[in-house]
Amino acid sequence: MKFGRNKSRRRVILKIIFVWLLSIAMSLPLSLMYSKDQGSLIIDGTCQIPDPLYKFIGSIICFYIPLLVMLVTYAL
């Protein structure tokens, strides 16, 4: 068993860049969809998005999927 047999510095950096670009590409439609939403509320001077589904899907797409991809690609 060899550790890091296929891990060059360049390859690791490219994988990390790919994961973050994928994350940005997946999160942009959600961000753009809500950027002009009149349903957004301002509570105590802070813009709030009242849709819990948006918060749930946004956290999965922007955090958990990139985290999972990084963990899997790092392990390969």
Image (tube, grey):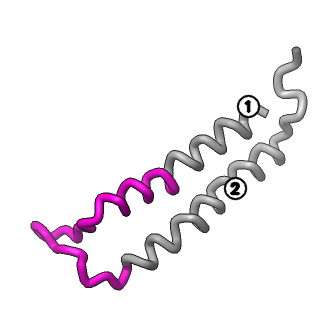
* Amino acid type at image mark 1: Ala
User: What separation in Å lies between label 2 and label 1 (alpha carbons)?
Assistant: 16 Å
In the image, residue 56 lies in the stretch drawn in magenta: yes
The magenta segment: 35-62
Point out residue 31 in the picture as x, y percentages from the top left corner. Answer: 44, 72
Give the number of the disc on residue 17: 2
From the viewer's perspective, tell me whether residue 2 is left or right of residue 32. Answer: right
How crowded is the residue under tag 2: few (<14 C-alpha within 10 Å), some, or many (20+)? few
> Residue at 83% of width from left, 47% of height from top?
10
In the image: residue 19, left or right of residue 2: left
Residue 75's disc is 1
Q: Secondary structure at mark 1?
A: helix
Which residue sits at x=51%, y=45%? 64
Residue occupying image coordinates x 50% and y 49%: 63
Q: Find out whether the residues at labels 2 and 1 contact each other: C-beta distance under 8 Å.
A: no
Q: Judge whether 7 appears above or below 63 on screen.
A: above
7 lies above or below 37: above
